[in-house]
Amino acid sequence: MRVPLSWLREFVDVAPDATPEDVLASFVSVGFEEEDVHAFDLTAPIVVGRVVSFEPEPQSNGKTIRWCQVDVGETNGGVRGIVCGAGNFFEGDKVVVTLPGAVLPGPFPIAARKTYGHVSDGMIASAKELGLGDEHSGILRLTELGLDPEVGTDAIALLGLDDVAVDINVTPDRGYALSLRGAAREYAHATGGQFRDPGLRDFEELEQPTGGFEVTVDDTAPIHGNVGASEFVVRIVRDVDPSRPTPPWMTARLTLAGIRSLGILIDITNYVMLELGNPIHGYDLDSLAGGITVRRAGEGEKLTTLDGKERTLSAEDLLITDESGPIGLAGVMGGGKTEMGDATRNVLIEAAIFDTVSIARTARRHKLPSEASRRFERGVDPLIPFVAARRVADLMVELAGGTLDVTTGGALFAEVFIPQIALPKAFASQLIGVEYTDAEVTGALETIGCEVTDAGDAWEVIPPSWRPDLTDRWTLTEEVARIHGLDRIPSILPTPPSGRGLTAAQRGRRRVANALAAAGFVEAVAFPFTTEAQNDLHGSSSGEHLPSVKLANPLDGQAPFLRRSLLPGLLQIAHRNVSRGFTDLALFETGSVFAPEPGVTYGTDTVPPLAQRPSDDTLASLDAAIPPQPRHVAVLLHGHASPKRPGLAAVPYDLSDALGAVRAIAVAAGVGIDVVQTQRAALHPGRAGSLRVRGVEVGYVGELLPAVSAAADLHGRVFVAELDLGAVLALVAAPEAAASLSTFPAATQDVSLVVPSDVPAGEVKLALVEGAGSLLEEVRLVDDYRGAGIEEGRKSLTFALRFRADDRTLTAAEATEAKLAGVEAAASRFGAAIRD
């Protein structure tokens, strides 16, 4: 919410010397976040001038310029010669002149310069050049604004261009602050300044005509039982002049508040919306057919809104209609058929209260956020529509020359009932941890507009009509803390019970993340949303379709599914980095994936009651309603491990680097991981491995298929690994006493086994380990040979074996016996034979 300071000063006392930063600090003290400071980027001298004379001078390019003599006042140099390309002014007109040394928004510095054969000693400015709007058809004539200032007057102050606005972030629960009325009230809370409520009007001024215009609310399908419009007030102003200019002070305030000037009638409705917080809509009364009915749309009904788009409506949409059909989306945007324009002479003013849920759903359904919907979906003061409608009417009479019709009008409204809230007297101090006196509690509540009645051990509190967020004792207590300063709340950490800390799984996850970071990987955090095709490709070994969780209201309609794998997110992050020139990447992520079980329906309609702990059965049913969410860790390598340097070629990442990341994870987790060749849908055949811990598959490692890499716009080889980190940590063996190191020498032998070429070397290695028994200390694959001397379809795997005993020096015969036992196991399992 942008708050122009000149406007703020109308409703609350602001110190004359208060800077925008001081004002922002005051808003921060009552719970708002500061955003920015907005001002007109103008630098003096910018003054009022009078056109003494001008000479039209046709140019060779077909353009006609005017060589003007403009009086800017004796103190500003008297009469100056200025070249101007506009033709909409006359001799004697008073205009805005930017003199040399001035700076216009852009920035656009002004200097005396030679152009079209003359030295132009300044510039005559248009409204757009001054930042007062988009009008650029000609220069700004002050007489059209109803102004007749002295020549030489400072034009910046005259047009309100010396004003400044502070921008505060208004959270959804504090919609009342989306108005100068609400912002001024909060500023008064922060500073103690006197607040002057623009919403207070005498009843006689607000007395509503009761006949001549029919208003009906016919909501046959209210959402959650709430009728779409609880109040609907109309006033009529006749004989307006839409050609009248918007006063400079109003244009300046609207501009600072972030709203374009669109003509006096629309500007007035926007001005009152910003002032009082009640969105206003104006209709061209003569284009209306009969009275107004508020109803739900028929499914598939059409409406062309003010932005010129035809919209297909939903049965949930709330409409404003007349006898001809829909004329507006209630609380969101009006229709083009009845909009106010240059031909409007009679105006129907609408000030209403619409259901927050209806407006929010309509705005999101049609992707049509507006200043009106922003306020209605947060809640508007139900006591303000009569005031807002009369305020708009008064301004149209004053500024647009209209006449208020005191005989024709209409209104529908429901009785406003605000329930009492019981606030125990000790509750605020107990909840916040600050000893508040009774006077401090009641004073804070009365300051924000509550009615407080002493009821013995508690206060009966009626919140003000503009605070729909105050619904219970907790929200009231929050206001007490806010008004008396959040800095009073002590910063004391609770003492943790002894013997507690991180769980074993938490410690394990941290060790793994720290190990990967220490190995040179950069941690990334991706959104958990993806497509069903990506889930099938990366979330299963063969690419078959598996069930995925689909979000009912996704952030991105093209990626509505929760991920089954971390790789889609890492690929997106890699693509984003490569597109920005960062091609050497070593990324990792730890996070949850979502793996629903086939045939199981998830979700529940059970909503636990508030303010009490759910039972164990309720918690169990809620847990059963969500799919398994195992925690994974994944790595991605792309580009070069070592860039090119003088005397050294670049070293690209390869599969050994991905295996190194797997080993780092294994060491940090405290497990041994075996790699067995496998196949996966997204990985290159022959360059994919299954990762196993004590025979249990926990993940995979390999090189992405070139087609998969290219689909992510990654060029070159990409290596990945992904493990079920929760499963890995669950397989960590219980701590054992460290065995003593043997002092006896080792016996080493090699063995070359011929096996079918499709048998993974890792499987053969496991067979050797199991067959050789406890004497085998280490086994390493040292060669994979396929060529002369080896039959077609077979390969020779050479393993280096090391044997050792704890209590003696092994003989060659003992080592050989253990080796042959391992060979026998490989032979029985894979048909392995010792190579001749």
Image (tube, rainbow, N blue to C red):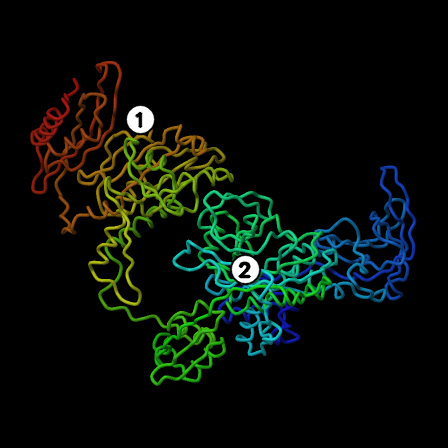
Q: Residues within 10 Å of mark 2 (few under 14, many from 20)?
A: many
State the CA–CA distance, disc 1 to disc 2. 73 Å
Q: Residue beneath label 2, please?
A: 215
Residue toward you, 167 or 709: 167
Q: Which residue occupies 60% across, 51% down?
A: 289
Relative to 477, residue 614 above or below:
above
Pointer 1 or 2: first along the chain: 2
Residue toward you, 762 or 783: 762
Q: Position of residue 613 (x, y in %)?
A: 26, 65
The answer to whether marks 1 and 2 mark residues whose Cβ atoms lie closer than 8 Å is no
- Quadrant in which the N terminus appears: bottom right
Q: Which mark is residue 721?
A: none
Q: Residue furthest front?
A: 212
- Quadrant in which the C terminus appears: top left
Please give left or right for residue 642 compared with residue 789 in the image.
right
Q: Position of residue 203 (x, y in %)?
A: 58, 75
Of helix, strand and loop, which one carries label 2? strand
Amino acid marked by disc 1: Pro
Q: Quadrant of residue 145?
A: bottom right
Q: Position of residue 315 (x, y in %)?
A: 44, 48
Q: Which mark is residue 685?
A: 1
Please give left or right for residue 774 compared with residue 422 in the image.
left
Residue toward you, 260 or 288: 288
Of helix, strand and loop, which one carries label 1? strand
Relative to 705, residue 221 above or below:
below
Amino acid marked by disc 2: Val
Please give left or right for residue 346 compared with residue 741 in the image.
right
Residue toward you, 593 or 821: 593
Q: Residues within 10 Å of mark 1 (few under 14, many from 20)?
A: some
